[in-house]
Amino acid sequence: MDCTAAGDLAGARTLSDAVLTLGLDVLTSGRLAFVNFTRSLLLGEAATLLPPLSAVIEIREDVAIDADVVDACRNLHQLGFVLALDDFVSGSEAEALMPFVKFVKVDVLQTTATDRAMLAARLRQRGIRLIAEKVETAEMAAEARAVGFRYFQGYYFCRPTTFAATSMPERQVAYVGLLGALNRLDFGIDELEDLIKHDVLLSYRVLRSINSWLYGLRHEITSIRHALVFLGLDQIRKWASVWVLAGLNSSAAPEIMNVALMRARCCELVGNMLVGSEEGASYFLLGLCSLLDVILGRPMADALADMPLAAEINDALLGTSNQPRDVLDAIIAYEQGNWDEAAVVMDRLQLSAATLPEVYANALRWARELSKITKAT
């Protein structure tokens, strides 16, 4: 398959999943969705399948700019669609689309700091918003921000920035200990109730969660003991782990917590599909802790040092090839749009890759509601 056909297929798949399977409201939580468009999709008016106020038509860097493309972009602009240019290079043929563009993406790995600064100064005068993509380090993010970039994209935001020589803040140490205690096999209901009641914010979040639409209760639950009895020990330990991780992430980017929540739910759902598997709670923790190194700014081995996780979950988080690692890899591949890779891993698990869109949609809805509760203090 040539690059053009592959791009068309990927773009069509994104449109299908975004509009038909997931729904843009679920996928973006009310934010703008950037959808890649090839020349064929652009000229074929596929953009009209998307709501103008919810989607940004992102024109790929390999689209040849000619009169037909300029006309298509002009028409979309007149219809109220927002357009973006991907991997823009100053002086390229894409300059012809500037009158219709609101966002411009710039690859920080393929441009110099001087070129980025000059481009940012020029485009900001035209009211065009700048997105730095392929941001790999904190230094890259800081430099781009300094010259006028306000939006960022890149793996840096899901990679740990390690500070091994410094000690963790006292509250982080307490929360790590709490997360470890929650997952001890010998942890009883009385000890759990006492632990939760002694953290005001944790108590509030647990009660707010159980009284949310997620459980559809007729009568409000007002005590931790009542919540424990209603949910059961395993469920409340899972919930409490979510809130503890939220406490650990209080100083980091909030999107990291959203990703961790989605991974947790996805891993739990896929884990429950496995033949003979009754380890949904463990798989939930697998996804939840998959960004613990990022949240703590510590190597994963250090982050897991005081966590009494099941051996295979611990090994999976450290990169060992096993069944839980396959589950996590499948979810991460799907999360990043690597659908073929996700399908290969799901096949290895003897599960259908066709279940992943619904799993991910479920997790998005679930994580969005949980994020609202997590932010409430």
Image (tube, helix red, strand yellow):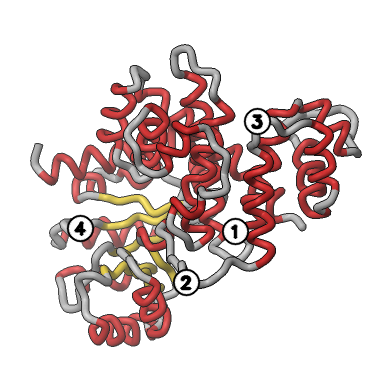
Q: Is mark 2 on a helix, strand or loop?
A: loop
On screen, 159 above or below 310? below
Q: Mark 3 points at which residue?
A: 185
Q: Residue 87: where, in percent of width, then height? A: 24, 65
| Residue neighbourhood size for the residue with mark 2, other residues' Cα within 10 Å, grouped as few (<14), some (14–19), many (≥20) | few
| Residue neighbourhood size for the residue with mark 1, other residues' Cα within 10 Å, grouped as few (<14), some (14–19), many (≥20) | some
Q: Mark 1 points at which residue?
A: 249
Q: Which residue is drawn at 26% across and 68% down?
A: 107
Mark 3 and mark 2 lie on one chain; the one further toward the N terminus is 2
Q: Residue 88: where, in percent of width, then height? A: 24, 69
* Mark 4 or mark 2, whichever is nearer to me: 2
Mark 1 and mark 4 lie on one chain; the one further toward the N terminus is 4
Q: Mark 2 points at which residue?
A: 165
Mark 3 and mark 4 lie on one chain; the one further toward the N terminus is 4
Check the image and name the residue furthest to the top: 276
**Amino acid, disc 3:** Leu
Mark 4 and mark 2 lie on one chain; the one further toward the N terminus is 4
**Amino acid, disc 1:** Asn
Query: Tag on residue 240?
Result: none
Residue 77, visible in the rendered structure: no
Mark 2 and mark 1 lie on one chain; the one further toward the N terminus is 2
Q: Name the residue under label 4.
A: 69
Q: Residue at x 74, y 35 (%)?
A: 213
Q: Residue 358: where, in percent of width, then height? A: 47, 28
| Residue neighbourhood size for the residue with mark 4, other residues' Cα within 10 Å, grouped as few (<14), some (14–19), many (≥20) | some
* Mark 3 or mark 4, whichever is nearer to me: 3
